[in-house]
Every structure is written in C-alpha cells, then in structure tokens.
Amino acid sequence: MTIAGTDRAAAGTAAVARATRPRRRGDFSRSEQRAGTAFAVPAIVLLLVFVIGPALVALAMSFTNARLISPVAPEFVGLDNFRRALTEDAVLHRSFLNTFLFAALVVPLQGGLGLVLALLVNQRIAGRNLFRTVYFLPVITSMVVISLLWRFLYQEEGLINSALSMVTGGYFAGQAWLADPSTAMGAIVVMSIWQAVGFHMVIWLAGLQTIPEEVYEAAALDGTTPWQRFRHITLPLLKPTFVFVLITITIAAMGLFIQVDIMTDGGPLNSTSSIVYQIVQKGFQQQQIGYGAALSLIFFVVVFALALLQRRLTRDSANLWLASFAKED
Amino acid sequence: MTATTLRPRRRLWAYLPMTILAGFFLFPIVFMVIASFKSDHQIFADMDSLRAFLPVGELSFANYAAVFDRVPFWRFLANTVFVTFSVTALGLIVNSMCGYALARMRWKGRAVVFGFIIATLVLPYEVTILPMVYLVANLPWIGFEGVRPVLEIGWLNSYHVQIIPFVVNAFSIFLFAQYFKSLPRGLEEAAAMDGAGWLRIYWRIIVPLSKPVFATVTILTVVTSPATWNAYLWPLMTVQSEELRPVMVGVQYFFQLDPAWGEVMAYVSMITIPMVAVFIVFQRAFIQSIASAGMKD
C-alpha cells in the first residue's frame, strides 16, 4: 500500500543525494516538497476514501429512498428522509434524548471517578501498582464481553441483586434492572463507567505526575490544608488533562451502541435506544440505507456542533493541547 | 508519639477505599472465570453467596468442550489475530510516515492536511459506519482466479474489508507527529550531508529513535481500535461468512432466549484471557502508553 509512496520517496532520495554535493537551498526544498507529499499520500488517500468518501455517500443517499440490497434503482425523494427524521420518528427523538442523557451522566461521573482513582493510586504507598492494574483491567476487556457478562449480573436472580440484598440485610428485594424502563439506562451507565474509568484514571495520573513535588512542599510550608492544595494547585494545573478527558469521554459516549445492542436491544419501551443503535436498525437491519444515511448526517452535525461547543468553552486549554504541535517554527 | 499511633490508622484509611474499589472492579471478571467451570445449575445455586466467586462444587471443562462444539473457535481466533496484526502493522507504517511529513518536512498543503486530521479527531467512527458499508459494497478490488487477476466489485465478506478502512487513524498520526517534533533539530540535515535520502533518514534514524511512540500507538490500536481485538459492529455488518468472522462476533452464537450461561462464560473467558495475559506481561508499557496519549508533549 505504500508502493506509490515508496517510489516517489525513492525519487526524492536520489534528488537529495544529488543535491548534497554543492547543494543549493532550492534543490533541497524541492525534494522535501516531493518527499513530504509522498510520505503523507497513503494516509491522505485512505482518509479521503474512508472518511470523506462515506460522508459524500451519506450526503448523496440521504436524498433518496435507496435500500442496501435492492433490484430497484434508488429514487430521489428530496428532503423526505430529513422531514421524517425530524418530525415523525418519535423513537429517534427518544434515542437522541437517551444518548444525551447517557453522555450527561457518563462524562462527569466517569471523569470524576477517574480523578478520584488517580489521586488514590498516586499516593506513595506500597502496592499502588497492583491497584492501578486492577482498576485498569476492565479497559482491556472488550465491551462486547462486558455487556454480555453484566447482562447476566443484572438479572433478577443475578449477582448484583444478591450482593445488594446481602449488604442491606435482605431489605432489598431484587430488581430486573434491564427490564425496567426506569432503571435500564442507569444500569448501562454504571457498567459503562466501570469498563472505561481505568483509562481516564491513567490519563489523570499522567497529568498529576507533571505537577512538581516542590510546588506542594512550598504550599505545605505556607500552612495550607490538603484541600486548599488540591483546589488551588492540583485542579488548575490539570486543566489541559481535563480538556482531553472531557472531549474523549464525550466522543465515546455519543457513539453508544454495543451495550444497547447486546443488553437491551434498545428496550424496554425504547428507554435505552441510542442514536447509533437507530442508525444501525433503520439503515442496516431494515435496509433503509437512504434514511439511515440521513440519520448519519444529522448525527454528524450534532457531534460536530458539540465538539465546537466544547472547544469554545475550553478554548484556552484546548488550543494549548492541540496547538503545542500546530504552531509553525 | 502521635505520629506512631496515627500511622496504622492512616494506612487503613488509604487502603480501605482502594481495596473496596478493587473488589468492585474485579468481581465480574472473577465471577466470569469461576462460573465458566460450573454447570448452569451450580452457577445459579451459588449466586446468593460468596460461593459465586469460589472454585467450589463440581468443576469441569464441560462448558469449554461445548464452546468448541458450538463455534469454530480457532478459526475465529486466527481471523482476529490476523486482522489485528494487519491493521496495527499497516497503521504503524502509514500513520507514522504521515506524522513524520507533518512534523518535520515542509511541503505545500501541510497545513490543510493537518487541519483536516484534527477535525476528524472529534468524530466517533460510528458516524460514518453506515454509509461506509454502502461504500465498501461498491469499491473495486483486484482478486485472483488461480493466477489470473480479475476485477471484482464489492469488498463485503473479505479480510481486506476488515483491515483497510481502519489503517489510517487521525489520533495515531497526531501522536506520531507530536513525538517526531520533540526529536532534536538538525538530524535530517546531518544525514542528508552524508547523502541519505528522506526514506533512508526516516527508516534508519527517525524510526529507531522513536520506539516509545511506536509502542504507544501499537498498544492504543490493539486496545481501542474498533477493528482490532474488539472488532464487533463493523464485521457484524460487512462479513457474513463464518470462515472470516472474528471472535467478538462469535458471541452472537450464544444469544438465545434462554442462554446456556456456563457456555457463555466459557466463551467470553476464552476471548478475554489472551488479552489480559498480554496486558499483565506488558503492564508497564500499557499504562505508560495510555498516559502519554493524554499528554500534550
């Protein structure tokens, strides 16, 4: 796959070699221009085909009634798909609300618990590496496996209920968590956090370790309390990490799918249906690819708007984070 | 005096929450492995006590034997390993070269390409997955009938449909570019003086100096890419043939109204333990890699 790039880079190699004797500045730049392009071309081509390509396909299909496998040619239906999505599809509206609710719960809880875990395992005590490993273990376990496993744990006669009943001395009777519309989404939220929080613990930990010990020592000499040090030293210095955590959890949360697909099929009463679940249901299972494409476009716009909003709200640090690279030198 | 009396209590306060949390993170995984050796009857009988986490009662490999009867496990595993290896290896080449061009070479269009890559960072891949199915169903591919190349239309039901769309990764490019930027200036100039070309400079000088970022991207790809070890939705949509499907899609063989839970636990243990083993061995590198993904330099 890099064949084209290799040839062109090899041409660049020869040019550099030629230019090395009494080298003129211009020659070097020209070979650099050619080699730079050649190095980037495989990635650019793949990005164009597999990111821009699907976006264009979605745009084209969304105005048609195309089906995934159909002998009949797709017809142009104008804005019908968008009208249906925005005004008629109550399940879709519910799915948008569910997905936002999921993100609104997961982002602060997972980000916050991740920070708590990071603070705990950042203490200088024996065995902290063991605890890090344990908290991180679910991250390397597939969400598919986790969802299947927790579907079992959440059953009425499952382990979660027997544990709760044991802790409360039999007071808690038991509950079919995934079968009740009022608890199903909460159950998915808890499990999702359980799976991914270790990842963000590690990110926070890396942020914590960039803060020099002397800063704390100096502050301690000034007679500050641990809480004051956390509030006025740790938190402000963690701001770039905060932005990274915020953005990555949001992106992941908006893509909610596997948990729903494996644990609830969007039920009960659509209380756990997510945007991606609807896209897969309509566009793939029911083969209405034109409608699914319209949903994908709407989803794209929503995610992009959300990303812009977050960038704006956290502007300084987000720019700091991204632009540490982008600035010219 | 106060210090010595306080210390054990303070230590208790440090360990108590950490231990409780450890239990919270471990219990489902311990349960999974233990239950995989029990009969369904025993699993449910043990549910209301700590026996659920203990290897007690009648233990056997019956569930594992049943898994091998139900699914072609080795075939699934081989598919997953092959696809994971291909996506990771090709990704290292393509993304690192692009990252290198962005970080250390001056060429027209660089700023545009970089801006575009940053923009795609914020998109969950699920956004494009449906139109991508339609796209790959209509892409051309050169297949072979014996030794004669033939033009085929449609990538569905193949290995390449599981690999090629996921080779390029904006975040990997970003990580490579950041790392390459941190290497000392003037490396290229010195090498160019000796007559080395760009490809040679990249391969002989830059790559050997950049092992940490290659390790990081490898680990992140294997753990977080939707096309490697955890591939599920994409192969579910694009690969119907059993011979080509990966391990995660195999869980579908266990979906029934009333699943045989012992078999389910055996199967999910089998597809989890290899990764856990790799993680335990390279634990330090894993944690380090994830940590460096969140750092800005």
Image: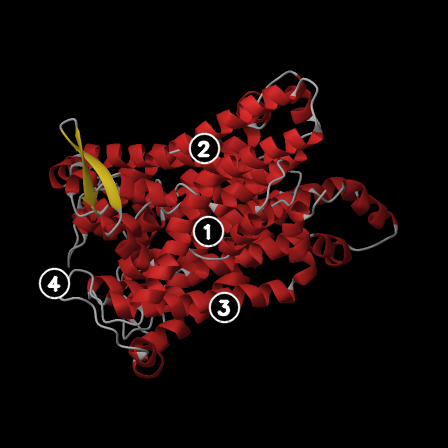
In the image, what residue type sits under mark 3? Ala
- Front residue of A199/A184: it is A199
Q: Are marks 3 and 2 in contact (CB under 8 Å)?
A: no
First in sequence: mark 4 or mark 3? Answer: 4
First in sequence: mark 3 or mark 2? Answer: 2
Residue beneath disc 3: A104
Report the Cα–Cα distance between label 4 and label 2: 40 Å
Report the Cα–Cα distance between label 2 and label 1: 38 Å
Query: Circle 1 — which element?
Result: helix
Residue drawn where x is 65% and y is 37% of the image? B181
- Front residue of A38/A47: it is A38
Residue beneath disc 4: A71
Residue beneath disc 2: A5
- Front residue of B216/A158: it is B216
In the image, what residue type sits under mark 1? Ala
Residue A42 is situated, as x and y percent measured from the top left of the image, at 44, 39
The answer to whether A273 appears left or right of B292 in the picture is left
Mark closer to the observer (2, 1): 2
